[in-house]
Structures are given as C-alpha cells and as structure tokens.
Image (cartoon, grey):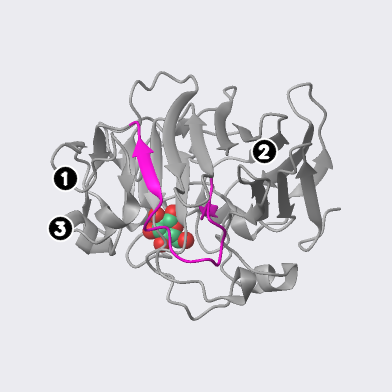
Amino acid sequence: MTKASDIFTLKNRNNVEVSFIGRGGQIVGIKVPDAKGNLADVVVGYETVDAALAGDTYFGALCGRYANRIVKGKFELEGTSYQLDINNESNHLHGGFDGFNMRVWEVEPYRSRKYVQAYKLSLTSPDGDQNYPGELTVSVIYGLTGDNEFVIEYTAKTTKATIINLTSHAYFNLKGAGTGTIEKHELQLNASKYTPIDGEIGTVTGEIAEVNNTAMDFLDGKPIGEACTSNDAQVKLVDGIDHNFVIGGYDGTLKLAARLLDPESGREMEVYTDQPGIQVYTGSHFDSSETGKLGTPIEKWGGVALETQTFPDSPNKENFPNAVLKPGKTYNHTCVYKFNS
Ligand code: BGC
C-alpha cells in the first residue's frame, strides 16, 4: 500500500527528474537543465514532503473527478439531478472537498518501451463518491522519455453514466521555482478562442469568444506579465489569467497547445494534448504568506499552471465538449510536457 508521504522519482540521462508523492499523485519537483546543464526545479511548491503534505493540496496534484468549476455544483444526467460540493464561492471546484488531490493513489512501477521510466497510479472512486454517480476506476501513467518529455496518460472507466474531467495542476516557473515571477515568461497558445468568465457566476458564461484584440491573444507569443498587467476586464476579474482556451484543430489527437519560454534561462516547455481545452492560471491567489522552494515566499504570479482538460462547466453547456463517460467506454486523456533548452 502506498503511503501519502511516499516519494517516487523518474529520471533520464539528461538529468531531467520528476518527483511525486502518493497523496494526490502530487508532483513535488521537476528538475530540468538549461543549455549549460544547470539544473533548476521548475515547479512551484515546498522544500520538503512534510511541507507539501501540509500545504496547498492542488500544487502539482491530480484533480478530479471534475477538474475546474461546475456552476453551483449542479448537473443533470439521464434525468437525474446531482448536487456536488460547493467548495469555491458558489461553485464546485476540482472534484469537491475530498477530490482526487486528497487521495492516496496506489503507485507501482510501469514498464513500456515509450518510457525510460514510468509509474502507474491507480484509484477506485466508489459509486456516489463526492456525490458523483458510478464507481470510477482511474489509472494515470507518469512516464519520462529520453527526449525530456514528461507524459501523463489518464484512463478511466465507470459503472454508471457520469461526468469526468481529469487534469494535473503543476505551476511552472522555468527560471526555477522561488526565483521570482513568471511575468517575463513568454507564452504562446494555439488558441484563437477562449471561454470568457463572469464575476458573478464565478466561471465561464458559456460564450466562446475570439482572442483577437484582447489580452487573451497569445497566438504569436508574448510575456505573461503584459497580459496580467493589462486593463482588460477579463484580466481584472481574476488579477491575471485564469481562463480556459480552446485548442486549435482539436480532433482528439495530440496537438501542440502551449509553448512557454523563459528568455533568461532559455528553458522552454511545450504542452501537447488530445483534449479540447487548456486552463491557464497565473497563480493570482498566491500572497507570499507561504514559504516555498529556495526558502522564498510563494508570490503572486510565481508560476503558471497549464492544465489540459475539457471546458469548465461543460455538463451544463450544450455548446461545450461533452464530458459524459458511459459504462463500457474508456476516458482517455494524454498530456505531454516537453522540456527543451
Ligand atoms: C483554477 C483557479 C483556482 C486554482 C486552485 C485552478 O485550476 O483555475 O481558479 O484558484 O485552480 O488552485
């Protein structure tokens, strides 16, 4: 049996190293070299496993059953209404009070020719867990390739029709967590559309809008700080970016969704996914009250989460992708974080 504090590490010959713990499958460190071979830990978090266990449980964690928000925690499926936890103002967030980020996943080594090293994380979520229908059997592969790709492969099956949206919640800072903010990081998104949010609803309105002529236009790449400090009303609502972007050319196969570059260190990360959306969140709620890596405060905009997933509140929005999983079908989701220097 895996314990909450058990720590597992994947490593390749280029000294890329991914570490995670049993609780939440929480990624607690990703070491990546720059062009000169200097290593930095590029995920925001804490210095010790004990601190990670006591700290923000979403850092680097697997989120589910429904990552992101569901308006008022309500949805209807096959004629039945469900009420989920309201754990984020008036909405449901990341699976509720006892989401998958809180669970101890069963971890075992996983062998595949694709990976230099890999682990399989498993979890069974009983029927009715957090009020979601169906027993959900989830497995997640964390694999590291020889080409510096950290791959997350999710699969899940259910015994009753249910809704699902799994993601990974690492906040990246390619200069190194604890060395300042990501304002100078350049972000490029393969997204000409995004889903605007509303302050009162607390999440998406259901509209799918063009990024054209707004702070949300990352098509050509630009410093994240430029967007975060703009006067755009969408930015002001969340003091930065906390938005779902519609990935261009979505067809269920792997597509480049995002490219993040730290011009100073030259470290770059590409994100590929077969999902329709990517939530970009610039860590606007970090307030320096907690001590993170390198013994420095975890400050506002200290990292950016690039969470591949379906859209927020999809179960209540007919024009959004379908997030229903039926018995006999398998939920599949792949996310690749590829590091270049
Ligand atoms: C959401 C943020 C939320 C954060 C919690 C992100 O995925 O987009 O709104 O505050 O998770 O860690």
The image quarter containing residue 316 is top left
Which mark is first along the chain, 1 or 3? 1
Q: Give percent across and percent down for residue 309.
A: 45, 38
Callout 2: SS:
strand
To which residue does mark 1 refer? 214
Q: Residue furthest front?
A: 36
Callout 3: SS:
helix
With 71 as the anchor, is 338 left or right in this view?
A: right
Cα distance between the residues tagged 1 and 2: 36 Å
To which residue does mark 2 refer? 140
Frontmost residue, 229 versus 336? 229
Quarter of image, ligand 1? bottom left
- Between circles 3 and 1, the one closer to the viewer is 1
To which residue does mark 3 refer? 233
Q: Give percent across and percent down for residue 55.
A: 60, 72
Disc 1 crowd rating (10 Å Cα; few below 14, some 14-19, many 20+) is some
Cα distance between the residues tagged 3 and 1: 10 Å
Q: Give percent across and percent down for residue 41.
A: 64, 56
Disc 3 crowd rating (10 Å Cα; few below 14, some 14-19, many 20+) is few
Q: Amino acid at mark 2?
A: Val
Cα distance between the residues tagged 2 and 3: 37 Å
User: What span is in magenta?
Assistant: 168-190
